[in-house]
């Protein structure tokens, strides 16, 4: 059994934040290294700080198999109880998921009034509730909380237990537990209906953007990588950008003009994180799918974070799970202005991977805060967009001159127009969408001759 304890020093100033102990378990099943365990605990500590808590101590239990009753075993629970009493701790956060029974047993065995035991998923849900601003965000958070809580709803004492089936215990009505479950189910159904309406509106907005023909770029990445700061720097969006996890939950879209004059739509998305609760993925699916419907992924990383490689792996895995893994991607290493930035090895590895790919992936260093490298980012983005276009010669009958007007109105790059007695020959650079609309006029596709 291994124990790791890091206690904070009294700085002479009373900290009014909730005092908490972080607890993790190392078993033969998860096979995590000590470095991986500490990285995960560091991230949970940052989550706790975002939620308004203060880490007083950390504990790691090494155990062959988890204890089904308390996860960490009775001896370790007693050590935890002593630690909490000695340090006026009112919250214990487990860096994994706990069952309702385990939470109740831990609280009972620790035996401190007003002390709560929560797990990592509950902490993340709490942060989402804290940062939800829009009506859609609040609906999504409430749905995720109820979906997480409903199957875990258990009674505490006789007042919550099911009515007995023996002599002298039968009676009309239902237990409070059953009533609560029915109420939660009705609320979940109502929230799903409300979100279905919101999702329909979002689909309408996406369809409008598709018709505009403007390339759509989704800014994705690990939480606190600097996505909102980048959108503000490039477009002056003025959205909230804080050095905290999950500071932004609601997607924001702004138009950005590239050096060559072409416009793109940049969308800031909710950040990713390890062990993201699947209820959050489900509730926020319409928001997360901004990456799925984008033409290009701008994958932002915090190059100053020592765990940048792990965060990149998590982000790419979640993009694959969402169905957005194969899209043209610009890898952006952010926060290069920080002294702690040391990602040269990862940058080279990603750059080599981009060169070995299909040519629609690039990597660039920037500082979203200072604007350093953002010009290069714009040029790289423009290069990816141009590779998605093709130079085509169209032969358009004079009777269908509206097709030429369409090329101009959709801002296709028209190089030349030769007018003939029966038709006009047009050389233009178009994207896949415009080509699909104009394909019947393609001289190569249709076998037409370009001369008159």
Image (spheres, helix red, strand yellow):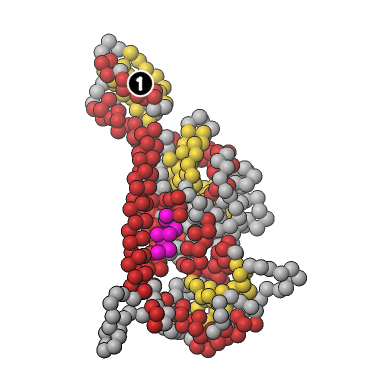
The local secondary structure at tag 1 comes to helix
Residue 114 in the image: x percent, y percent? 55, 77
Q: 252 or 117: which is nearer to us?
A: 117
Left or right of 108? Residue 389 is left
Q: Residue furthest top?
A: 421
Residue 342 in the image: above or below residue 438: below
Residue 19 in the image: above or below residue 441: below
Left or right of 443? Residue 180 is right
Q: Which residue is mark 1?
A: 405
Residue drawn where x is 39% and y is 57% of the image: 283
Q: Residue furthest right?
A: 12
Residue 335 in the image: x percent, y percent? 61, 51
Residue 146 in the image: x percent, y percent? 40, 64
Screen quadrant of the C terminus: top left
Screen quadrant of the N terminus: bottom right
Left or right of 247? Residue 424 is left
Is 142 inside the magenta-drawn segment? yes
Residue 261 in the image: above or below residue 282: above
Residue 331 in the image: x percent, y percent? 50, 49
Left or right of 209? Residue 169 is left
Q: 390 or 412: which is nearer to us?
A: 412
**Region in magenta:** 139-146
Residue drawn where x is 47% and y is 47% of the image: 251
Is 100 inside the magenta-drawn segment? no
The quarter of the displayed image where residue 183 is located: bottom left
Residue drawn where x is 30% and y is 28% of the image: 438
Residue drawn where x is 52% and y is 56% of the image: 131
Instruction: Please indicate, yes or no, whether residue 315 appears anywhere in the rendered image.
Output: no
Q: 206 or 109: which is nearer to us?
A: 109
Instruction: Please indicate, yes or no, whether residue 216 appears anywhere in the rendered image.
Output: yes
Q: State whether the magenta stretch is mostly helix, strand or loop.
A: helix
């Amino acid at each position: 059994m291994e124990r790791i304890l890091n206690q904070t020093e009294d700085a002479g100033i009373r900290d009014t934040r909730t005092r908490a102990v972080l607890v993790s378990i190392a078993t033969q099943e998860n096979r995590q290294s000590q470095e991986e365990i500490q990285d995960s605990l560091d991230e949970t500590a940052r989550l706790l700080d975002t939620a308004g808590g203060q880490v007083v101590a950390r504990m790691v239990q090494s155990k062959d198999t988890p204890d089904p009753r308390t996860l960490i075993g009775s001896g370790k629970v007693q050590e935890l109880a002593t630690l909490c009493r000695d340090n006026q701790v009112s919250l214990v956060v487990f860096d994994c998921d706990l069952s309702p029974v385990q939470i109740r047993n831990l609280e009972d065995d620790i035996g401190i009034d007003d002390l709560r035991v929560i797990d990592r998923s509950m902490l993340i849900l709490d942060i989402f509730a804290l940062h939800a601003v829009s009506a859609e965000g609040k609906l999504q958070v409430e749905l995720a909380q109820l979906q997480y809580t409903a199957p875990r709803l258990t009674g505490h004492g006789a007042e919550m237990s099911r009515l007995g089936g023996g002599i002298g215990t039968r009676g009309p009505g239902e237990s409070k537990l059953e009533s609560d479950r029915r109420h939660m189910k009705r609320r979940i159904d109502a929230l799903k209906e409300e979100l279905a309406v919101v999702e329909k509106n979002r689909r309408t907005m996406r369809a409008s953007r598709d018709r505009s023909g403007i390339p759509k770029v989704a800014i994705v990445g690990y939480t606190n990588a600097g996505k909102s700061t980048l959108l503000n720097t490039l477009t002056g969006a003025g959205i909230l950008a804080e050095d905290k996890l999950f500071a932004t939950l609601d997607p924001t879209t702004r138009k950005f003009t590239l050096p060559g004059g072409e416009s793109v739509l940049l969308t800031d998305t909710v950040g990713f994180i390890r062990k993201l609760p699947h209820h959050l993925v489900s509730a926020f699916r319409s928001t997360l799918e901004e990456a799925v419907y984008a033409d290009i992924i701008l994958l932002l990383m915090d190059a100053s974070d020592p765990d940048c490689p792990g965060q990149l792996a998590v982000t790419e895995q979640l993009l694959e799970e969402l169905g957005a893994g194969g899209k043209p991607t610009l890898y952006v290493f952010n926060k290069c202005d920080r002294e702690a930035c040391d990602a040269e090895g990862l940058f080279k590895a990603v750059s080599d991977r981009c060169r070995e790919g299909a040519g629609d992936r690039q990597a660039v260093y920037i500082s979203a805060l200072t604007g350093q490298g953002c010009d290069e980012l714009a040029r790289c983005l423009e290069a990816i967009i141009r590779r998605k276009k093709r130079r085509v010669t169209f032969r358009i009958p004079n009777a269908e001159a509206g097709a030429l007007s369409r090329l101009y109105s959709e801002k296709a790059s028209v190089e030349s127009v030769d007018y003939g007695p029966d038709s006009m020959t047009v050389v233009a650079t178009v994207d896949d969408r415009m080509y699909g609309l104009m394909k019947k006029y393609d001289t190569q596709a249709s076998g037409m001759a370009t001369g008159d």
